[in-house]
Amino acid sequence: MGFCSPKISISSGASRHFLPGWGGHVSSCNGVVVPLRKRKSRRVRFPISAAAATSSSPAKIVPLRRRNERAEKMTSAMEQLDIERGVCIPFRKYTPDTVRNKVLESRGSTLSLLARGVEIVWNLGLYWSALTYDCLVGRDEEVVPYRARQLRNLLCDLGPSFIKAGQVLANRPDIIREDYMNELCILQDDVPPFPNQVAFAIIEEELGQPLEQVFSKISSQTIAAASLGQVYRATLRETGEDVAIKVLRPEIEPIIYRDLFLFRTLASFLNGISLQKLGCNAELIVDEFGEKLLEELDYTLEARNIEDFIENFKDDPTVKIPRVYKQFSGSRVLVMEWIDGIRCTNPQAIKEAGIDINGFLTIGVSAALRQLLEFGLFHGDPHPGNIFAMRDGRIAYVDFGNVAVLSQLNKQILIDAVVHAVNEDYAEMANDFTRLGFLAKDTDVSPIIPALEAIWQNSVGKGLSDFNFRIVTGKFNQLVYNYPIRIPERFSLVIRSLLTQEGICFTLKPDFKFLEVAYPYIAKRLLTDPNPTLRERLIQVLFKDGVFQWKRLENLIVLAKENVAKMSNNPALQHNNIRSSRSLQVAKKLDLTETIKDGARMFLIDSGIRRQMIMALTEDSKLHIQELVDVYRLVEDQIDIPSVALEVLQDLPNVTRDFMLAWTDTILSDR
């Protein structure tokens, strides 16, 4: 398929009915109770109903009748994003109304919009005409490399909004084909820095005091410069600590708002095409993109992200997150602890520093998986400039302006997908994609099931050691381009992040096997996490077609023990700089106490589990004592039998109570 008829997917398949154009955004979550993003200052759950906005007095709602009727018939794109993500954000920088008002209320807005609109339409129109001509003369495939480079240069010329859009497209196989994606992957965000005098004036304005009163020195050259801001290195006068100062580019916000307004206006004309091609609305991808882009323009949000990461990893002595100096920071300036580390793509320097590469890679993969499956807050831009190897062996992250937030439900579905892959249940795996928002709810998944099976079987057919995430992603990209699949923005960040980190791993160790580190972590989570939903997933893994998988249980235990051993014996923990009580937070043994207690509880209370376990011990008309002994031998050095037995006995009154309640419910239901 040539690029001349590109696949244009502009977002969520959650619904086919949306407010067209720039209709008003109703601040609701459609009556659905959704959790806010987890933060110390905003830990609340609440239902917000669109109906709650209506008045009980008919006289008051007559002037708004048309608007209310329209709102009843259609759901706004932003509401759909909140419902799909399971995360409702009541105070957001981006809404279609906010962007429209910001643009139209500015002086000279009409002339500016007209000029910019003509510039965008003219340049994109010329490019599209060239693609159309290539198709007509039958040379569309042979000129793909040239046209891809041309697109990259065009986006650079159109400014920061288009540079950011190109970086998003580089991870969106649902929108453009893979060869164009590969070209956009090298799209650089580097631009000439703006003058120091301007940057220093912005810093002083945010500080409310002269620069020299806070900093004893500051670099005369920028450490890094990008389309949205630039970074300096400085030293705090009071403490002598080195810090990084991130300064927002002046007058960038009006430019971004203007371009987002034009993006969404153009997208409103593509709704029919996108609905026909993908069953999703064209404006949604603009809303996803705009929301993330405006978050990057507010450094107070980045400061909160850093605080969240610090909280998440506070008990992990192998991960370093820089401290934020909030007293010196604001919406346009962010002052952070300076990270004195080694770029993670410099294996020679890492070796010379005495850092164990295998240990560092284990730390990195485990930290990434914890972000994804445990915390639901994921670093969205872990390129080599944002990840460092500390000289004590820890991994350090910087630049938290772009993060992906996953709800508890999203995390559970991701684990479901892993379980279904292990069980080779590809029909349920396809349903998982629907639940995650990759497919519209009414999409027929039957044509996708064989493709998913082929991708997975070809990827792990020779064993997990041959699994390559980039190869799997490449095959998945082809599937996405050929089927009505849309990749939600948060998952495009996750995929890009995993790909980038796998690439870093290959740079440090060319024969690195991602799953050899990832699977032990997942096995440990399944076996030790007391979360009831993970207990259910563990049961799904251990029972296939009603038959207990003894070998799979043994493999899980072996993998989990491997994860514990790798983390507890990691050289980073032995380094003098971090040898402290914090290192005790890393478990030395596989703690199965809660798992055994829950297993005993389920055996006594749940008749279905009890029946399955008895069948597992007596399958094929024989007692499976040897399998039970094999499992015990694997865990005997990991658990203290008397202590576990004591805890089980102490929990017996609660188990007895639950058993009586379950038995009573059964009796009453039978009657």
Image (cartoon, grey):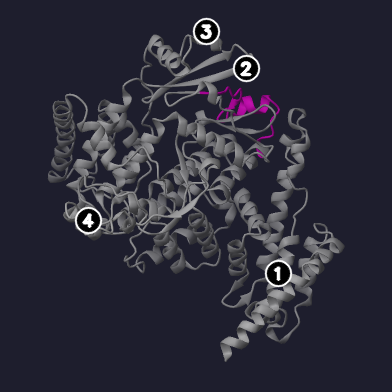
**Mark 4 residue element:** helix
Indicate the position of residue 450 as horizontal and vertical percent values.
40, 66
**Mark 3 residue element:** helix
The magenta span reads 335-358
Cα distance between the residues tagged 3 and 4:
56 Å
Q: Disc 3 marks which residue?
A: 212
Q: Quadrant of residue 92?
A: top left
Q: Nearer the viewer, residue 600 or 618?
A: 600
Cα distance between the residues tagged 1 and 2:
52 Å
Q: Disc 1 marks which residue?
A: 599
Q: Is residue 119 above or below residue 512?
A: above
Indicate the position of residue 8 as horizontal and vertical percent values.
25, 49
Query: Which mark sits nearer the N-terminus, 1 or 2?
Result: 2
Residue farthest bottom in this picture: 671
Cα distance between the residues tagged 3 and 2:
15 Å
Left or right of residue 104: residue 620? right
Cα distance between the residues tagged 4 and 1:
53 Å
Q: Which mark is in front, 1 or 3?
A: 3
Q: Which mark is in front, 3 or 2?
A: 3
Q: Is residue 476 above or below residue 336?
A: below
Q: Disc 4 marks which residue?
A: 68
Residue type at mark 4: give it. Asn
Asked if marks 1 and 2 touch (Cβ < 8 Å), the reply is: no
Residue type at mark 1: give it. Gly
- The 10 Å Cα crowd at callout 2, few under 14, some 14 to 19, many 20 or more, is few
**Mark 2 residue element:** loop
Quarter of the picture containing the C terminus is bottom right
Q: Disc 2 marks which residue?
A: 241
